[in-house]
Image: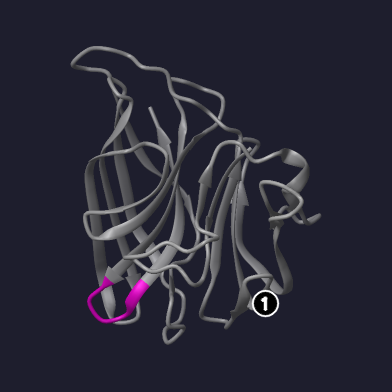
């Protein structure tokens, strides 16, 4: 399965051991609740990350992806207050095929998101105002990504990246990204993006968005 995990300890300048973006996680280690929220992820039996106590909120998805946020409790990697969160996306892995040509691009718009949370825990969870991306299939690569979130007194905190990798965990252009393609359609893929981005007055903020591309 394709898995993105943004731990509550990640910052905009540095990933941590549990910062994940991969399309090779065995399905048997990704455990969900009856309500559809994932409570455990892992690449093998010796490296499982699980929610011990707390809540799974912001749960959304369909047959191709699921997102959610662990909060107000503890996991195998530490405690989280009601204002903090560990964000995830789990879905069907998709490797986009290369398509050559000047018009070989896909435009992506926001489909679902978790509520952005401040790493400090000093602000109530916010909201995603907008998220867009463009995929260049000549690579394929991520031609452009734009995020706009609201949290605390930051009504429109933004982050943008251009000409960057379409999968993996990477830090560049001022913030951290976890990127994976998901779904079953080459012409209408999903793009799951976890982020840790700086904001003017709320510090580093993390979250997950899923974009519909076509």
What quarter of the picture does the C terminus occupy?
A: top left
Question: Where does residue 158 sit, x and y in percent of width and height?
Answer: 24, 62
Left or right: where does residue 126 sit relative to residue 52?
left
Residue 84 drawn above or below residue 26 = below
Residue that extends furthest to the left in the rendered view of this protein: 102
Of 131 and 80, nearer the camera is: 80
Displayed quadrant of residue 62: top right
Residue 28 drawn above or below residue 130 = above
Question: Where does residue 104 sit, x and y in percent of width and height?
Answer: 27, 18
Of 131 and 8, nearer the camera is: 8
- Range shown magenta: 199-204
Question: Where does residue 82 sit, x and y in percent of width and height?
Answer: 57, 82
Residue that extends furthest to the front in the rendered view of this protein: 46
Q: Is residue 200 magenta?
A: yes
Left or right: where does residue 212 sit relative to residue 176?
right
Q: Is residue 69 magenta?
A: no
Residue that extends furthest to the bottom in the rendered view of this protein: 122
The residue under the point 23% across, 60% down is: 174
- CA neighbours of label 1 inside 10 A, class few (<14), some (14 to 19), many (20+): some
Residue 53 drawn above or below residue 87 = below
Residue that extends furthest to the right in the rendered view of this protein: 34
Left or right: where does residue 49 sit relative to residue 194?
right
Residue 47 drawn above or below residue 117 = above
The residue under the point 53% across, 28% down is: 94
The residue under the point 27% across, 20% down is: 138
The residue under the point 23% across, 48% down is: 161
What quarter of the picture does the N terminus occupy?
A: top right
Secondary structure of the residue carrying numbered label 1: strand
Q: Write down the residue under mark 1.
A: 74
Is residue 165 something that shows in the picture? yes
Displayed quadrant of residue 92: top right
């Amino acid at each position: 399965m394709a898995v993105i995990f943004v731990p509550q300890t990640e910052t905009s300048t540095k990933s941590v051991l549990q910062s994940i973006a991969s399309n090779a996680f065995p399905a048997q280690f990704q455990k969900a609740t009856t309500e559809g929220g994932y409570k455990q992820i892992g690449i093998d039996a010796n490296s499982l990350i699980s929610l011990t106590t707390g809540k799974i909120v912001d749960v959304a998805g369909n047959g191709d992806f699921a997102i959610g946020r662990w909060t107000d409790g503890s996991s195998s990697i530490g405690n989280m207050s009601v204002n903090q969160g560990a964000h995830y996306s789990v879905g069907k892995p998709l490797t986009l095929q290369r398509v050559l040509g000047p018009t070989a691009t896909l435009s992506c718009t926001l489909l679902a998101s978790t509520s952005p949370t401040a790493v400090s825990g000093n602000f109530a969870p916010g909201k995603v105002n907008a998220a867009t991306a463009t995929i260049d299939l000549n690579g394929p690569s991520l031609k452009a990504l734009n995020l706009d979130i609201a949290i605390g007194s930051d009504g429109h905190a933004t982050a943008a990246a251009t000409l960057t990798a379409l999968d993996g965990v990477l830090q560049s252009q001022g913030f951290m990204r976890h990127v994976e393609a998901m779904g079953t359609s080459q012409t209408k893929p999903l793009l799951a993006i976890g982020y840790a981005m700086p904001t003017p007055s709320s510090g580093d903020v993390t979250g997950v968005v899923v974009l519909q591309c076509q």
